[in-house]
Image (tube, rainbow, N blue to C red):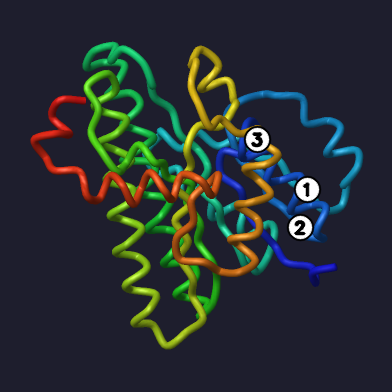
Amino acid sequence: MIKNLKAIVIGGSSGIGKALVEILLENNYTVGLSGIERDDLNYLSEKYPNNLTINYIDCSMENCSRELQGLADYLGEVDLIVFTAGIGKLKNSPGYKVENDANKLNVLGFTEIADWSYTYFESRKHGHFVAITSMAGLIGFRTNAAYTACKGYQKNYMEALRQRANKSKHPIYVTDIRCGYVETEFSKDLNTFWISKPAKAARQIFSSIRRKKSLSYVSKRWRVLAILLAFIPSWLKGKF
C-alpha cells in the first residue's frame, strides 16, 4: 500500500481520467477530481467519502487555474497533478470554428494548467506533473489537422518542462503519456486497431507515474509505431 498522497486529476470525470481516479483512490491517494462531464460519480463518492473531492472546472475558460488553486488549497499539499482533459475530432476536420473551440482547451487551457502546475511544484520544491498527450502529436494528418497540431504542441511543451525539471535542484518530475486509441466517448465512432479499454490504459499510466518515467506510450505497443514514424521521410508522410 502506498502512503497517503494527494493528487488532482484534470479531466477526471470520464474516460481515461475517471479510470485513473479509481486506481489512485484504490492506492490510498486523496484525489481532487475536476472535469466538465457529469458522468455518474456517486459510487466513487460513496466508496471513498473521505478521499475524493469533486470540482467541475472548465479548462477552456481563461483563468481556470484560479479554480485549480482553490482546489489545491482545499486539499492541502498536492503531490501529483495529472492533465487528462482533451477534445477534438479524430475524423473529418469540421472547420475553423469547431477546431478553434477545441484549441481553447488543447492549447490555451493546457498551457495555463501546465504552467500553473509546474510553478506550484517549483514553489513547494517537489511534485510530479503528468499530461496525457497523444500519439497524434507525432505526425500531422489531413482529417484532423488541428488535433494533431495541438498534440504536437503539448509534446514539445512537456519536453521543455522536463528540461526545466532536470535543471532543478529539487525532486520535480514531468511525465508525458502518449496514448494511442482508447475506447471512450471521444473515439466511439472509430473503427480502428490497437484500441485499449480505459481501465487497461489507466493501469499502465499509473505504473508510469509510480516509476516517475519521463515518457511512456499507452498501450506499450505504440512505442513501435513511434520509432517507425521517426524514420519516415517527409515526402512519404505527405502521401498519408
Q: State the separation of the CA atoms marked 1 and 3.
A: 20 Å
Task: Residue at 68% x, 57% y: name it.
Answer: 74
- Asked whether residue 3 is in view, the answer is yes
Which is more N-terminal, label 3 or label 1?
A: 1
Q: Amino acid at mark 2?
A: Thr
For label 3, the SS is helix
Q: Amino acid at mark 3?
A: Pro
Q: Position of residue 167 (x, y in %)?
A: 34, 82
Task: Residue at 83% x, 53% y: name it.
Answer: 26
Give the label, 2 or 3, closer to the camera: 3
Q: Residues within 10 Å of mark 3 (few under 14, many from 20)?
A: some
- Residue nearest the viewer, comparing 133 with 195: 195
- Residue nearest the viewer, comparing 97 with 146: 146
Q: Which residue is mark 3?
A: 198
Which is more N-terminal, label 3 or label 2?
A: 2
Q: State the separation of the CA atoms marked 2 and 3.
A: 21 Å
Query: Quadrant where the C terminus lies?
Result: top left
Q: Which residue is mark 2?
A: 30
Q: Which residue is mark 1?
A: 52
- Residue nearest the viewer, comparing 21 with 133: 133
Q: Position of residue 94 (x, y in %)?
A: 29, 11
Q: Is residue 143 left or right of residue 239?
A: right
Q: Amino acid at mark 1?
A: Leu
Q: Is residue 119 left or right of residue 234?
A: right
Residue 133 is marked as none
Q: Quadrant of residue 182?
A: top right
Residue contact between numbered discs 2 and 1, judged by CB atoms under 8 Å = yes
